[in-house]
Image: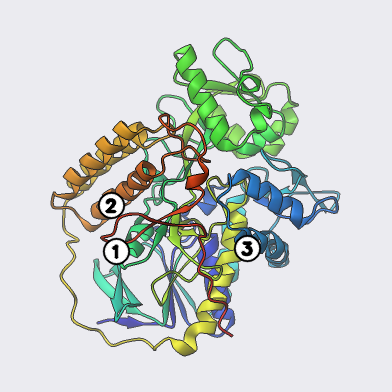
Amino acid sequence: MALNTDFIVIGSGVAGLRAAIELASAGAEVTVLTKDKASESNTEYAQGGVAVVLSEDDDPGLHEGDTLVAGAGLCDERAVETLVTEGPKYVQQLIDWGTEFDREGGELIFTKEAAHSRRRILHAHGDSTGAEFVRSLIARARAEQSINLVPFANTERLLTTDGRCVAVEFLDPVLKAPRQIYGKAVIMCTGGAGQLYQHTTNPPVATGDGMAMAYFAGAEMADMEFVQFHPTALSIDGAPRFLLSEAMRGEGGVLRNRAGERFMPNYDERAELAPRDIVSRSIVAEMRRTGTRFVLLDMTALDADFLKHRFPKIYETCLANGIDITTAPIPVSPASHYSMGGVRTDLWGRSSVPGLYAAGEVACTGVHGANRLASNSLLEGLVFGARAGQAAIADQSQIPGPKPQYERLGTLDFGLGTQMSTAVRKRVKRLMWERVGILRNRDGLERAIAEFDQIARASLSTSSKNFVTLARLIATAALWRQESRGGHYRTDFPEQDERFRIHSIQRLNEMITSTPEINFDRGIGV
């Protein structure tokens, strides 16, 4: 039997929770489906903080300018303006809801990170900002009686009728069987796809299923080639690729090679504070030059008590793996971290499929361009999660109510063994890291695409099909973009090319098309 609700939100990170709160505040019944526990998302693992203009010496125009520079000519200026001007309102709202940002003498503490012209990064509990976001948003969501949080409910696909998204099919955690839920709209907030790569800072849930489901439902995908690799992930055999925050370099940490030499000034005049894509490529170049698998992040010049207070989680994690960051440098190397591309949306989260909205990392508003500015992602989730909720409510007069259950179009196979899925994922992750990673070229990309096509011809579970499809979308877009820009670097086309100052757009069963602008804003509808 099918379930009915007013609105369906998929994902419980910052964007999903903020969208759900917005919907519930308007009196709607909201069902939030998440594949793990409600707190498990990329948001929870965000250490760096949230970039927002709240200090007296800052200005939204400066924040906008920094974002545009980092985006390497591909940001949508309207999206960036929306982010930086509305961001302060939503962060202040979080504070009013009880979010505990770090303070000194009662005043908010602002720090600086790479490519920011001002100290505008707010942190919570040193390096646990994302976890504090999730805590306060879940508390606020649970205060709304019309929000139903359903953990361990893995969404398998979107259902459409007459071109409109009207429902989702998910694996019911109680019945252990597929079930459908209908609503006036679906808001996709499933996060990114870092798990496509062999080395990633992302949690296991970041598999990109939401992007793939939207693609199969007919949504346009934009800028899939742009993947951000975080320069500094813990690189110790047997240890997780734990993220070492951008803020560590912002506070004065330096990168050294195995000989103890500081090398970043040799690659960029901004040294350790250059944008992430430049730092990542510089680390790769230095590792190749010196024949090592890692470089060293040196924090030892900073006061020990300051480091323990400022980076408590990082300090404890490194100590558990045999590194005291107050006395010894930390072995680090790059890992996949963030997807700039995703489901193409307007400034209100509307996708190209009526009834389907998207917000957060799963979406592509154009706000990040070719390279996300550090600590803009939590702000994006807040701002555009709220806006997607507002748009869904405003549009509901044009949206039909929940539909009765209709005959299912085929049967999903939930019974394929995990062995096939595990084998597929290992192969895809290796191919993505080796051929669609930090450094790319035509030969490697073509070989990767050929192997993805071979994998796709096998009988795959739904999740494996999503996985390989998304990998192919990224590789195809990377092959099409014959230049280097932001998070996309081609060794055979190492320079920016103004002919490619356009966005890649991919649709189901179509070759890549392009557009000079990412948005197709239709207004709020009220």
Q: Nearer the viewer, residue 257 or 309?
A: 257
Identify which residue is drawn at 50% across, 83% down: 395
**Does the rendering let one see residue 141?**
no
Question: Is 25 displayed left or right of 292 in the figure?
Answer: right
Residue 400 showing in the rendered view: yes
**Are discs 2 and 3 less than 8 Å apart at CB?**
no
Q: Which residue is mark 1?
A: 216
Instruction: Choose top left, top right, bottom left or bottom right for residue 405.
Output: bottom left
Q: Position of residue 57 (x, y in %)?
A: 85, 50
SS of the residue under disc 2: helix
Q: Are marks 1 and 3 in contact (CB under 8 Å)?
A: no
Task: Tell me the residue that label 3 is attached to.
Answer: 78
Q: Position of residue 430 (x, y in %)?
A: 30, 34
* Observer-nearest of 198 and 57: 57
Q: Which label's residue is closer to the chain start, 2 or 3?
A: 3
**Element type at mark 3:** helix
Residues at circles 2 and 1 in contact by the CB criterion of under 8 Å: yes
Q: Amino acid at mark 3?
A: Arg
Pinpoint residue 388: horizontal percent, then vertical percent. Answer: 53, 71
The correct choice, above or below, for 287 with respect to 119 in the image is: above
- Amino acid type at circle 1 is Phe
State how far apart marks 2 and 3 are (Cα): 31 Å
Closer to viewer: mark 2 or mark 3: 3
Which part of the image, by quadrant, shows the C terminus? bottom right
**Between discs 2 and 1, the one toward the N terminus:** 1
Q: Decide which of tag 1 and tag 3 comes sooner along the chain.
A: 3
Tell me the distance, in whole angstroms, between the alpha carbons under discs 2 and 1. Answer: 9 Å
The residue lying at 81 percent from left, 53 percent from top is 55
Q: Which residue is denoted by mark 2 in the rendering?
A: 469
> Disc 2 residue type?
Thr
